[in-house]
Amino acid sequence: MKIRRFELVLLTLLTGCDKPAEPPPPPRPALVMVVGAKAAANPMVLVGEVRPRYESSQGFRINGKVIERKVDVSAHVRKGQVIARLDAADTNLSAAAALADVRAAEASYSLAVAEVERQRQLFAKKFISASALDSREAELKTASAKMAHVKAQANVSTNQTQYTNLTADREGVVTMIRAEPGQVIQAGDTVVKIADTKETDVLVAVPESRMTEVKLNAAVTIKMWADRQKAYTGVIREIAPAADSATRAFNVRVTIKDADESVKLGMTSGVKFNQPNEQQTEEFLVPTSALTEINGKKIVWVIDTDNKAQPREVVAGLFREDGVLIADGLQAGEKIAIAGVHTLIKNQQVKPVIEAAP
């Protein structure tokens, strides 16, 4: 009797020590999207730099020492405006010496003409031989040639006095200048760059894999990174015939048709290559965050009708700026997880939070 009563007490104590069963965890919230229609063809958008259509590099045509610089970078210049000057002392002396040589040659020529005239009169009277006359006429020709030679040299010296002034060969803005008073310049060295601001281009590098989408004279849309709300129209003006050896991309120049004062040289811009007949692809566009990899397989987590996460193998296509294309494995209308996919497990209960499809 005592033993049985002890067993009942022990059973009561053991029963009182059991913990109550824990309720199942609440469904985990999961950000999901509904797979929509087939993705639209992706227009190519590339980053470029605003460049002048015409930009000339200018320098002095003679050696010399800079004595004056008249413009600064960003200055607007007109055609023929003086930019910098060299010391003209030596060129002026050379021009004066050349002019003296011309006067001496002219005097020699005049003397040779008079001498030939006298020799011809003497020859007509049979006082001299024909060979003596021929000798004087040869001297006249020599004097004439020497005079022409020194006159040409004098013209060169005169031109060099003008070359001491570096003038703008076009109207535009100064983008670079390397001339300071006291600096010795060599002939042909680039001293200034002048950009024509009347016409501006955008220079973009197009990958060789997408060159089929670039056509000469095709319309494009341009937006400056400084103001992405405003769009400009452009046209493809020039396509490089060969790829750049370093980047393996083709340089393409796009002319901005309606550029205004807010478009500055050197600005960064985005160029959208328009496709006149955009068609639907055979693939679904999903965010890249929805795609994961398990055991070497591309996986997307599909949320079934019971709100449970199910892994599904898919075939991933092209990765784009706005997501990744899924070629096979999904159907329109299905819900897929697009955040935290690396922490999901099979048959995990979730609470879908719908996000609009991209």
Image (cartoon, rainbow, N blue to C red):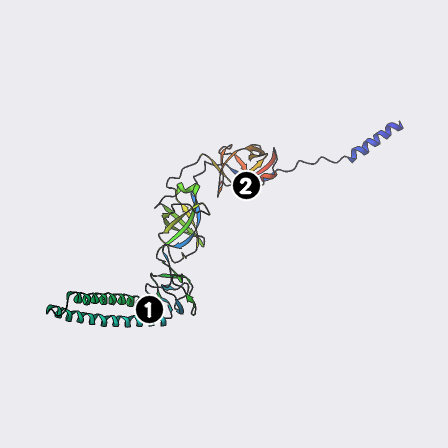
Taking depth in this image into account, of 146 and 210 the one nearest to the observer is: 146
Taking 24 as reference, is 339 left or right? left
Q: Is residue 300 visible?
A: no
Q: Closer to us: mark 2 or mark 1?
A: 1
Residue 292 in the image, given as x and y percentages of width and height: 56, 38
Taking depth in this image into account, of 191 and 357 the one nearest to the observer is: 191
Task: In the rendered view, tell whether residue 309 sits above or below residue 249.
Answer: above
Residue 339 in the image, given as x and y percentages of width and height: 56, 41
Q: Which mark is residue 289?
A: 2
The secondary element bearing badge 1 is classed as helix
Badge 1: few (under 14), some or many (20 or more) residues near its Cα, within 10 Å?
A: many
Q: Quadrant of the N terminus?
A: top right
Badge 2: few (under 14), some or many (20 or more) residues near its Cα, within 10 Å?
A: some
Q: How far apart, in angstroms, are the residues tagged by discs 2 and 1?
A: 71 Å
The residue located at (41%, 42%) in the rendering is: 211
The amino acid sitting under disc 1 is: Thr
Residue 322 in the image, given as x and y percentages of width and height: 48, 43
The amino acid sitting under disc 2 is: Ser
Disc with the residue nearer the chain's start (2 vs 1): 1
Tell me the quarter of the picture where residue 281 sits: top left
The residue located at (84%, 29%) in the rendering is: 7
Taking 185 as reference, is 113 left or right? left
The residue located at (11%, 68%) in the rendering is: 124
Taking depth in this image into account, of 111 and 318 the one nearest to the observer is: 111
Task: In the rendered view, tell whether residue 312 sits above or below residue 106.
Answer: above
Tell me the quarter of the picture where residue 206 sits: top left
Taking 180 as reference, is 128 left or right? left
Q: Is residue 124 visible?
A: yes
Residue 184 in the image, given as x and y percentages of width and height: 42, 67
Task: In the rendered view, tell whether residue 58 sits above or below residue 303.
Answer: below
The residue wearing badge 1 is 161
The secondary element bearing badge 2 is classed as helix
